[in-house]
Image (cartoon, rainbow, N blue to C red):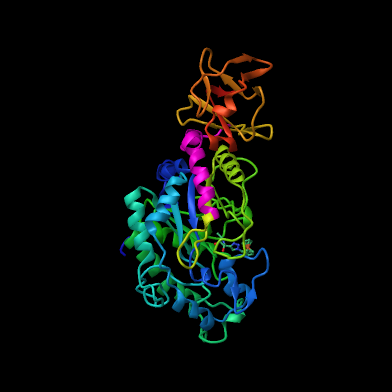
């Protein structure tokens, strides 16, 4: 490369906002954690992972030596993997993008990497490029493809750091993290960007002491130079504040914050953000994890996140055979039905200063500012009173999914009162029962 542009220094606020607009509008994406860990699925040689431990961490949690873990590569043969079906499931759920683990902490790559033999083509009997199939289907069905990529690597001999002593037994003679970065990680990222054109790179495993903020900034610029329009999360560097996921300092590298298994308590002050979350208690498949969140809870999370201006990245952990677990598929289908009716209150919306009213109302606003959406997380009884909203005189208020306009009154002190007819709930299409959206022409009370 002759000229490396310093995007961190040279990009204006306006340029950054334009680059991220599609992502902010998208609101809802599918996270896919898939790799060798789906084979043990929470149990290795008769040892079962403790309850609450995450499946994709089994190599670390049960201290499986590299050579022993590598055996799973020889068993990786997901004959039921159907990229078309996965993308269909995401699309029908109303998800606009997919973030799949190109490589998780265990180091196994899901594509035909030229700098690695520890990938699906060279080390597994499956010998088909998983990412290529997914990229083709995403393109065909209009879903945006993105990659998760772990900086920490428990397999690569150069990346095996002293704080993972259990891996220092066999292959690791002379680890050199910088060599891993320059000769392995960066070439892999170049392959990923050039071969599959991902829209987002979602880094993780950045907390290891070998990784520094200057390296993060350098990597950010490296990736942006490969693809100037790409979006990169804040785990590229060292800025994130633990599981809360927003930044600890102002000039941290990365385009968005990454709360993990939690939702911000309020709006962000500037940095775009995305909450990633599991539907049960694990990211990578665990055969014994049946602690599923309800579809209602997932819809409420989506509404809460949208009201606070964030994105929801909801995870599935496919099985070793290549299937998304049925409880996940069922919940996603329910969310998709809810979004078919209520999607205009979620996608491409803006948030209000007061993003909620009471415990059960969440507000969003159409991009043009004409409408406010009041999403009620429970059924409202015979009247809905909203203090935060000033409706436009003479305008119609409707509940999404029902055509009949609702009677309403407005009074500067009492606020907006919407009359709810007895049969309205029955009229609402079935999946609307998770939350009810009232579309109001008007503005937030000043
Ligand atoms: O890929 C999934 C998980 O495998 C990975 N991130 C999601 C998206 C992950 N989840 N939890 N962990 C990794 C555990 C890491 C916890 C900690 Fe830390 C790392 C505790 C201390 C270092 C994060 C960074 C919390 C504090 C600092």
Instruction: Point out residue 221 in the picture as x, y percentages from the top left corner.
Output: 42, 58
Which quadrant, please, contains the N terminus? bottom left
Question: Per the image, is 279 magenta?
Answer: no
Q: Is residue 418 visible?
A: yes
Query: Mostly what secondary structure, the magenta segment?
Result: helix
- In the foreground, 371 or 227: 371
Q: Residue at x 56, y 18 (%)?
A: 406
Residue 368, quarter of the rendered image? top left
Q: Is residue 446 visible?
A: no
- In the foreground, 311 or 34: 34
Q: Is residue 264 left or right of residue 24?
A: right
Locate ligand 1 by image quadrant. bottom right
Q: Which residues are magenta?
A: 327-352
Instruction: Point out residue 331 in the picture as x, y percentages from the top left corner.
Output: 54, 48
Which quadrant, please, contains the C terminus? top right
Against 13, residue 140 (above or below) is: below
- In the foreground, 247 or 309: 309
Instruction: Point out residue 157 in the picture as x, y percentages from the top left corner.
Output: 49, 80
Q: Residue at x 48, y 52 (%)?
A: 30
């Amino acid at each position: 490369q002759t000229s490396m542009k310093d995007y961190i220094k040279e990009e204006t606020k306006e340029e950054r906002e334009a680059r991220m607009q599609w992502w902010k509008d998208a609101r809802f994406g599918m996270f896919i954690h898939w790799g060798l860990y789906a084979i043990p699925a929470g149990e290795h040689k008769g040892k079962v992972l403790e309850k609450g431990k995450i499946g994709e961490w089994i190599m670390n949690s049960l201290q499986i030596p590299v050579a022993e873990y590598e055996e799973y590569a020889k068993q990786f043969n997901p004959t039921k993997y159907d990229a078309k079906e996965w993308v269909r499931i995401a699309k029908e759920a109303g998800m606009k993008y997919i973030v799949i683990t190109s490589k998780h902490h265990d180091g196994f790559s899901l594509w035909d990497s030229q700098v690695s033999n520890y990938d699906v083509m060279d080390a597994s009997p499956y010998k088909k490029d998983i990412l290529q199939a997914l990229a083709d289907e995403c393109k065909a069905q209009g879903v945006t493809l993105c990659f998760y990529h772990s900086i920490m690597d428990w397999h690569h001999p150069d990346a095996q750091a002293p704080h993972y002593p259990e891996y220092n037994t066999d292959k690791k003679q002379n680890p050199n993290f910088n060599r891993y970065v320059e000769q392995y990680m960066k070439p892999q990222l170049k392959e990923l960007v050039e071969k599959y054109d991902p829209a987002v790179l979602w880094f993780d495993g950045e907390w290891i002491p070998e990784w520094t903020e200057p390296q993060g900034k350098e990597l950010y610029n490296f990736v942006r130079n490969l693809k100037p329009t790409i979006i990169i999360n804040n785990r590229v560097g060292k800025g994130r504040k633990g599981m809360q996921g927003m930044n600890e300092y102002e000039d941290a590298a990365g385009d968005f914050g990454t709360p993990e298994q939690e939702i911000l308590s309020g709006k962000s002050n500037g940095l775009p953000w995305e909450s990633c979350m599991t539907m049960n208690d694990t990211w990578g498949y665990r055969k014994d994890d049946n602690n599923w969140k309800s579809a209602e809870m997932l819809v409420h999370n989506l509404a809460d996140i949208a009201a606070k201006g964030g994105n929801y990245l909801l995870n599935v952990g496919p099985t070793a055979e290549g299937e998304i677990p049925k409880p996940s598929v069922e919940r996603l289908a329910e969310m998709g039905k809810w979004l078919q009716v209520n999607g205009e209150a979620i996608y491409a919306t803006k948030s209000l200063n007061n993003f909620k009213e009471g415990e059960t109302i969440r507000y969003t606003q159409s991009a043009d500012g004409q409408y406010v959406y009041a999403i009620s997380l429970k059924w409202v009884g015979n009247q809905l009173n909203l203090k935060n909203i000033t409706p436009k005189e003479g305008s119609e208020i409707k509940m999404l999914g029902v055509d009949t306009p609702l009677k309403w009154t407005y009074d500067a002190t009492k606020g907006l009162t919407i009359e709810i007819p007895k049969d309205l709930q029955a009229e609402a299409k079935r999946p609307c029962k998770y939350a009810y959206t009232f579309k109001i022409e008007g503005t937030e009370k000043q």
